[in-house]
Image: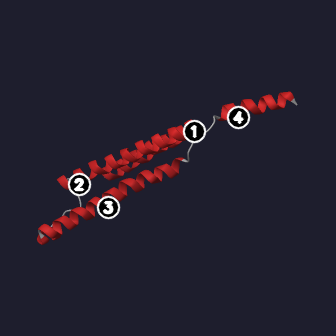
Amino acid sequence: MLSILILIGAYRYYARLAEKFGKVKWHLGLLAIGVYLGTQIILGMSYGVYLASTDPEAVNNVSYTGFSAANLVGWLLSLLAVWGVYLLLERKYKQENLQKPSIEIQQISKGSEESQN
């Protein structure tokens, strides 16, 4: 249940970033979901390999539901991954906006060309 709430929050968080920089909302929203789920899968597989290598009997007794220390650490690391990718995208989009000329400047130049004709 907590993962579903985190996914919804991550989707909305990235959608606001897309709106701020004029990008497609659902593209970035799906990216957020992919980053979260990908991190969860990698962490879960890593934890499973660790358990299998240290205590093979523990693999049969793993509970996939509920709150365990491994689940809490996984959620925390996944949230950090989502936040880190968000910061990278935000920095990238800010640099893109600084490099390309403003639409307003282009409209002003078009308006002055029309007035000269």
Residue at the disc numbered 3: 41
Residue type, numbered disc 2: Asn
Quadrant in which residue 102 is drawn: top right
Q: Nearer the viewer, mark 4 or mark 3?
A: 4
Image coordinates for residue 24, horizontal then vertical, percent: 55, 48
Point 33% across, 56% down: residue: 39
Residue at the disc numbered 2: 71
- In the rendered structure, which disc, 4 or 3, sits on the residue that comes first in sequence? 3
Q: CA distance from mark 4 to mark 2?
A: 52 Å
Residue type, numbered disc 4: Gln
Quadrant in which residue 47 is drawn: bottom left
Q: CA distance from mark 2 to mark 3?
A: 12 Å
Residue at the disc numbered 1: 99
Q: Are marks 4 and 1 in contact (CB under 8 Å)?
A: no
Look at the picture and state if 85 lies above or below 59.
above
Element under label 3?
A: helix
Q: Is residue 100 left or right of residue 65?
A: right
Image coordinates for residue 77, horizontal then vertical, percent: 28, 50
Residue type, numbered disc 1: Gln
- In the rendered structure, which disc, 2 or 3, sits on the residue that comes first in sequence? 3
Residue type, numbered disc 3: Ile
Element under label 1?
A: helix
Point 32% across, 61% down: residue: 41
